Image (spheres, rainbow, N blue to C red):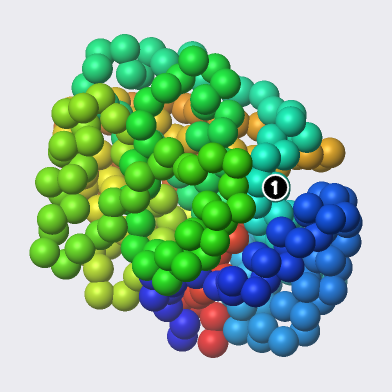
């Protein structure tokens, strides 16, 4: 049974190829490369295929044929989000359009100057949110809490080809819990703390609830922290639409103090709504429900 280990898949060479195609051939040509990349993933990443196939077949209830085709399409869309993120960072922001759904909620959330917590998921393309936030007079520092230590080289490369350095700060989860102090300091400065709530990894604390009709484990940290800090909490997603268009969603969470399980339940309900609308944009390639042999 495969567990998520805190590391994501991807190589520096792959990003270099995408950057070359974007700069020399254009975004649509870079998308063309994905037909071959997605086919390679579909043919050779057997374990990943099983886990994402289970999501389509058993949790969404799709037919076997539709689910297999969805696995390929899921890889393709994932590649598109990577290309879009790279293109926007490389100075091609004007090629993209966007719309906000709930941005006023986010502005009101920050009005009390207590900081705030954003909880997202591995769906869509949240990493490009800062590029759009900067265009609507929403100048708040975003701090992303993460365990993904593998990608420092890739992040450095993307910054080297970017038209400007990303303003997002990273707070890395530490065994000594020192990240809690960094989170509290950021909130005291009226900054935003962003978690992803859909990846539990072995050995960490977890909470359980049902997602799409089957019980699963979720990382306890985001929900314990968010329910104890007495700061506003919102669910935020940046979802890819057709023709280089993105849709940004914000929904304010109703949080009871120290009710982490209740916050998790609310988060899962919100996440299920997004998965229903954008089923191909969930990028979790491991045995999330611990159901796959």
Mark 1 lies on residue: 87
Q: Is residue 98 visible?
A: yes
Which secondary structure, mark 1?
A: helix
Examine the image and state in which quarter residue 139 appears: top left
Q: Is residue 212 above or below residue 125?
A: below
Residue 217 point in image, percent of width and height: 37, 63
Q: Is residue 253 visible?
A: no
How many marks can you see? Answer: 1
Q: Is residue 101 above or below residue 40?
A: above
Residue 177 point in image, percent of width and height: 13, 58
Residue at left offset 67%, top offset 24%: 99
- Tell me the crowding category of disc 1: few under 14, some 14 to 19, or many 20 or more residues within 10 angstroms, Cα based: many
Residue at left offset 59%, top offset 47%: 162
Residue 291 point in image, percent of width and height: 50, 77
Examine the image and state in which quarter residue 82 appears: bottom right
Q: Nearer the viewer, residue 52 or 103?
A: 103
Residue at left offset 35%, top offset 19%: 109
Q: Is residue 116 above or below residue 68?
A: above
Examine the image and state in which quarter residue 4 appears: bottom left
Q: Is residue 234 left or right of residue 285?
A: left
Q: Nearer the viewer, residue 269 or 49?
A: 49
Q: Quadrant of the C terminus?
A: bottom right
Residue at left offset 85%, top offset 50%: 26
Q: Is residue 180 left or right of residue 285?
A: left
């Amino acid at each position: 049974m495969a567990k998520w280990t805190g590391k994501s898949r991807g190589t520096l060479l792959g990003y270099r190829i995408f950057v070359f195609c974007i700069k020399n051939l254009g975004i649509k040509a870079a998308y063309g490369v994905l037909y071959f990349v997605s086919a390679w993933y579909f043919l050779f990443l057997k374990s990943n295929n099983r886990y994402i196939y289970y999501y389509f077949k058993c949790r969404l209830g799709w037919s076997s044929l539709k689910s297999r085709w969805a696995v390929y399409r899921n890889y393709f869309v994932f590649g598109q989000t990577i290309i879009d993120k790279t293109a926007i960072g490389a100075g091609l922001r004007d090629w993209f359009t966007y719309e906000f759904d709930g941005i006023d909620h986010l502005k009101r959330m920050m009005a009390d100057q207590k900081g705030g917590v954003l909880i997202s998921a591995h769906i869509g393309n949240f990493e490009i949110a800062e590029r759009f936030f900067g265009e609507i007079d929403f100048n708040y520092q975003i701090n992303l809490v993460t365990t993904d230590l593998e990608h420092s080289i890739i992040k450095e490369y993307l910054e080297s080809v970017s038209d400007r350095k990303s303003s997002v700060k990273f707070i890395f989860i530490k065994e000594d819990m020192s990240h809690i102090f960094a989170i509290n300091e950021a909130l005291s400065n009226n900054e935003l703390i962003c978690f992803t709530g859909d990846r539990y990894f072995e050995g960490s604390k977890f909470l359980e609830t049902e997602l799409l009709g089957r019980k699963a484990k979720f990382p306890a940290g985001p929900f314990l922290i968010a329910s104890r800090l007495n700061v506003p909490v919102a669910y935020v997603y940046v979802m890819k639409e057709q023709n280089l268009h993105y849709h940004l969603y914000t929904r304010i969470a109703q949080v009871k103090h120290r009710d982490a399980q209740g916050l998790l339940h609310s988060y899962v309900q919100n996440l299920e709504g997004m998965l229903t609308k954008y089923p191909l944009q969930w990028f979790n390639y491991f045995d999330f429900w611990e159901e796959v042999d």
